């Protein structure tokens, strides 16, 4: 009887060790993982001078502020190592501020950026690993909505083009296909739940076209913005 009692703690210890050593099997061929979380977008921005009717305004430019949003990912494992990820989520709202000759304007406007992306990823380790670093490449299709300019910027541009401050201005931003490079780490809590942290670099440029209606006819202004955002992503996922 005493031998059985003495053996009991050993059996418990052995069972715990065996459980910890058991395969996680959290990411393998055929698995689909749906993840949601937080994305921080930090543009590495620059801009060309604003051109009015082809004439550049010296030392004029615009800067883009950081933004945060809700992210959604769907990852499907083709093999234990190769996966395809669709990146989506709520479009962040970016704020543009005048720089140089336009600094006195302050905020120029806002726009929502839509950038669904498709990435091919390679996961290191194996299906039983709790920690799985990964690298990925792909592309995002980018377009903009809810583009708005501030009254002060419209008045400033109207004064430059029409000699008054009451001429309306419309704005459009060009769509583009942007390459994406990605690196990250997945941590598997168990066979279903996981956490993912990744950093992506998006090579992104856009052209802004502005049309100011004047008594003499429309006046066209243009500029080009380089955004090149670094996107930091933290999500929690569930395997189906």
Image (spheres, rainbow, N blue to C red):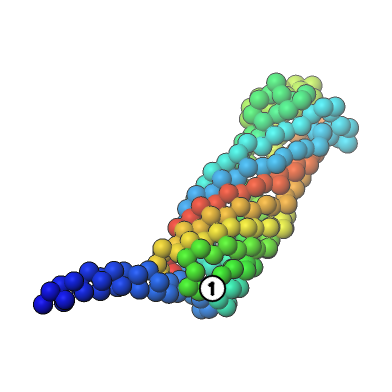
As drawn, 143 above or below 156: below
Q: How many residues crowd mark 1 within 10 Å: few (<14), some (14–19), many (20+)?
A: some
Indicate the quadrant containing the N terminus: top left, top right, bottom left or bottom right.
bottom left
Q: Which residue sits at x=60%, y=39%?
A: 66
Q: Residue 121: percent from the left, percent from the top?
A: 62, 67
**Residue 1 horizontal side relative to residue 130, left or right:** left
Q: Which residue sits at x=67%, y=31%?
A: 97
Q: Label 1, on which residue?
A: 126
Q: Residue 55: percent from the left, percent from the top?
A: 89, 32
Res 32 visible: no
Q: Residue 76: percent from the left, percent from the top?
A: 54, 72
Q: How many marks?
A: 1
As drawn, 20 above or below 49: below
Q: Nearer the viewer, residue 103 or 2?
A: 2
Q: Which residue sits at x=69%, y=52%?
A: 202
**Residue 14 horizontal side relative to residue 175, left or right:** left
Q: Nearer the viewer, residue 216 or 15?
A: 15
Q: Which residue sits at x=88%, y=36%?
A: 54
Res 67 visible: yes
The residue tagged with tag 1: helix, strand or loop? loop
Q: Which residue reaches farthest front?
A: 2
As drawn, 211 above or below 229: above
As drawn, 66 above or below 126: above
Indicate the quadrant containing the C terminus: top left, top right, bottom left or bottom right.
bottom left
Q: Nearer the viewer, residue 208 or 65?
A: 65
**Residue 130 horizontal side relative to residue 140, left or right:** left
């Amino acid at each position: 009887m005493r031998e059985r009692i003495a053996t009991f703690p050993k059996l418990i210890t052995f069972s715990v060790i065996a459980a910890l050593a058991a395969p996680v099997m959290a990411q393998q061929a055929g698995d689909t993982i749906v993840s949601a979380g937080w994305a921080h977008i930090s543009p590495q921005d620059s801009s060309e001078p604003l051109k009015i009717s082809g004439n550049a305004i010296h030392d004029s430019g615009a800067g883009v502020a950081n933004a945060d949003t809700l992210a959604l990912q769907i990852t499907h494992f083709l093999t234990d190592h190769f996966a395809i990820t669709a990146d989506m989520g709520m479009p962040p709202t970016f704020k543009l501020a005048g720089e140089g000759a336009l600094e006195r304007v302050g905020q120029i406007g806002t726009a929502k950026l839509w950038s669904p992306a498709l990435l091919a990823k390679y996961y290191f380790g194996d299906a039983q690993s709790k920690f799985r670093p990964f690298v990925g490449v792909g592309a995002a299709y980018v377009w903009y909505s809810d583009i708005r300019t501030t009254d002060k910027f419209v008045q400033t541009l109207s004064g430059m083009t029409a000699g008054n401050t009451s001429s309306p201005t419309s704005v459009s931003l060009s769509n583009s296909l942007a390459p994406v490079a990605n690196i990250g780490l997945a941590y598997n809590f168990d066979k279903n739940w996981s956490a993912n942290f990744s950093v992506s670099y998006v090579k992104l440029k856009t052209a802004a076209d502005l049309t100011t209606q004047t008594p003499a006819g429309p006046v066209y202004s243009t500029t080009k913005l380089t955004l090149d955002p670094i996107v930091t992503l933290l999500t929690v996922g569930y395997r189906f």
